[in-house]
Image (cartoon, rainbow, N blue to C red):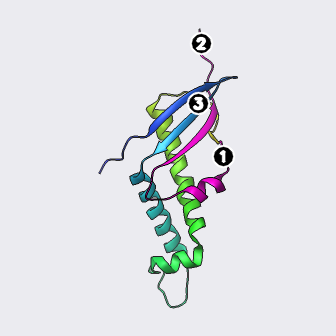
Amino acid sequence: MSEQALKVKVNELADNRVAVEIEVPEDRCKSSYEAALARMGSSVRLPGFRPGKVPKPVILQQVGISRIKAAALEKLIDKAWKDAIAQESIDVISEGELKEELQSLVDRFNPNESVTFTLEAKVAPESK
């Protein structure tokens, strides 16, 4: 199964900066969430369960859905940023900066829906 393409909008800002709005489709959100849940599940150690065999509801109860969503979003944002700058051929010379607090993104993140966020970065000046 190939990943769906990202919806990307690039807005040029002053001082050689761009704002890149990225919409990540729900299939990527869900797979990132499931991967984060699996990573957390393999690291949780609870009496009565073999390592890596803790049921998902117990992991959610012990770790908390907010931490799992945050871990999923961190990986998702990083991968989407790399894919978006490659897709749009943007020549960035700095790391992308999330334009909203990660916590507010975590609060509105639903792994069964697409998510949209904006990153800003410095780009190489255009040679004339």
Q: Nearer the viewer, residue 19 or 42?
A: 19
Range drawn in magenta: 99-128
Distance from the alpha carbon under mark 2 to that under mark 1: 31 Å
In the rendered image, residue 53, in percent from the top left (x then y), is placed at: 44, 80
Q: Nearer the viewer, residue 61 or 95?
A: 61
In the rendered image, residue 85, in percent from the top left (x then y), is placed at: 50, 34
User: Could you tell me if residue 71 is visible in this image?
Assistant: yes
Q: Closer to the N terminus: mark 3 or mark 1? A: 3
**From this viewpoint, which residue is outermost toward the left?**
1
How many residues crowd mark 3 within 10 Å: few (<14), some (14–19), many (20+)? some
In the rendered image, residue 46, in percent from the top left (x then y), is placed at: 55, 85
Q: Which residue is mark 3?
A: 92
Count of marks, rendered view: 3
How many residues crowd mark 2 within 10 Å: few (<14), some (14–19), many (20+)? few
Distance from the alpha carbon under mark 2 to that under mark 3: 14 Å
**Residue at 55% in and 55% down:** 73
Task: Find residue 100 and name its label.
Answer: 1
